[in-house]
Amino acid sequence: MYHLLSFFIFLLLSNFINLTKPFRILIRISDCVYVFFIYWALTNNIQILLTLLMVFLSKLGYVSYKYWGIKNSKAFILNFLFNFLPLFIISFVIYYFSFSDLIKSLVGSDLLFVQSIVYFVLLQIFYVSMYYVLSFLFGFRVFFNDYYSFFYEDFKSLVLGILFNSALFIVLNDLSGVNIYLVFLLVLGLIPIALTNYNYNWIVRATMNTVEKIADIIEAKNSYAKNHSRRVSDLCVKFGYYLGLDYDDIEKLEHAAKIMNIGYISIPEYILLKNSSLNLSEERYIKEHSLSAYNILQKLDMYKDIATIIKYHHESWDGSGYPEGIRGNAIPILSRILKICDVFLALLEDRSYRNAYTLEQALEILEKEKSKFDPEIYEKFIDFIYKEYKLNKVDEVSKVGE
């Protein structure tokens, strides 16, 4: 029983030992620990139900920690199923591989390395299959952060990850034959790797938060647009969930909206506060602010995708936008989503040269300017707004047509 309690703590901690960025290869050490534990428990005559109970509780504890404070029961349940079910299935695979006379005669104990490779290949297949099944049935992808995921960037990384875990599995198995606590010591020795990965992620987040604060300060130069980006960001997230975007795309969209106006730093303040029409020279400044933002951000590796979203979020479907005047599907889809959210909220806000429009007026203006938006996204956005603002569509459509 003491061994089992130790193993439960060991399993719980292993969830956090993943080797991802900045190493640019995803190696889930936690997967290796789980597969080894299941194998060790079954070969040491520990009941499979007790083994699965420990796996269940460990994954439940991990998901509970990860989603602490997030009031979304669907996200919690789906992430738990994704984390637990592949390990549940692999338990029975290991049981069959370990105790089947046919497998023993074909493989033998001297080919445990080959056997472990089979485990990790199958586990990868189970993870991928579970992801697509849950996404198809329940829209799981909007709750799943690919940044810490099981997906590998390319075939080379996939092979290296599987080979690394298989080799580590063999090492853990050899150590367990001497003393099971040597396994604990080895995995504890991997904690510095986990901390390196954690510190890298912390630095990335700290950098992004700093850029957001700088963008807020720059945007505050225009008192009429203060907190506009934050409101757009919130709307983008809600609309992203409505569209069923991947979690990672929603996260990119959220951050891009928060810093989309960082290019205001290149615009003289008198232009931002001008309460009359802009002349051609002043319009040129305005139209260059998204390009200025791109030039600032694209030099940072973590901002490659976000910088592109911002660069094109003023482009129009009909080609009348800026800075490059591209049209249609040439505009990145996240830029198209950001554009319509940005325009809609801008219409509802006061500006130095006009008062805020009412919701009905804003919808009417969007209808008149619909050629500037992706037709499919426009229709879905209008449906989303009616649901978000709890409007009666029949009544509102008649008002917009008046």
Image (cartoon, rainbow, N blue to C red):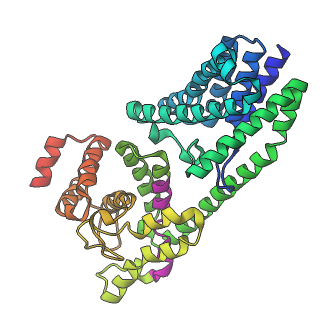
Above or below — where is 133 with respect to 328?
A: above
Q: Which residues are magenta?
A: 252-269
Q: Which residue is more in the foreground, 322 or 184?
A: 184
Asked whether the viewer can see residue 359, the reply is no
Above or below — where is 131 with respect to 266?
A: above
Image coordinates for residue 294, horizontal then vertical, percent:
48, 72
Q: Which residue is more in the foreground, 96 or 287?
A: 96
Asked whether the viewer can see residue 6, the reply is yes
Image coordinates for residue 382, horizontal then vertical, percent:
25, 49
Q: Is residue 188 left or right of residue 342?
A: right
Q: Please, what is the dominant secondary structure of the magenta stretch? A: helix
Q: How many marks?
A: 0
Image coordinates for residue 198, horizontal then vertical, percent:
71, 49
**Residue 53 forms part of the magenta stretch:** no
Above or below — where is 400 with respect to 12?
A: below
Which residue does the image show at 50% across and 57% down from the upper left?
255
Q: Which residue is more in the foreground, 290 or 388?
A: 290
Q: In which quadrant is the N terminus drawn?
A: top right
Which residue does the image show at 61% across and 31% down from the upper left?
63
Which residue is situated farthest in the front direction here? Answer: 105
Image coordinates for residue 245, horizontal then vertical, percent:
40, 46
Above or below — where is 4 with respect to 298?
A: above
Which residue does the image show at 90% across and 26% down from the upper left?
178
Which residue is situated farthest in the right direction here? Answer: 178
Q: Is residue 317 left or right of residue 298?
A: left
Q: In which quadrant is the C terminus drawn?
A: bottom left
Q: Is residue 16 left or right of residue 295?
A: right
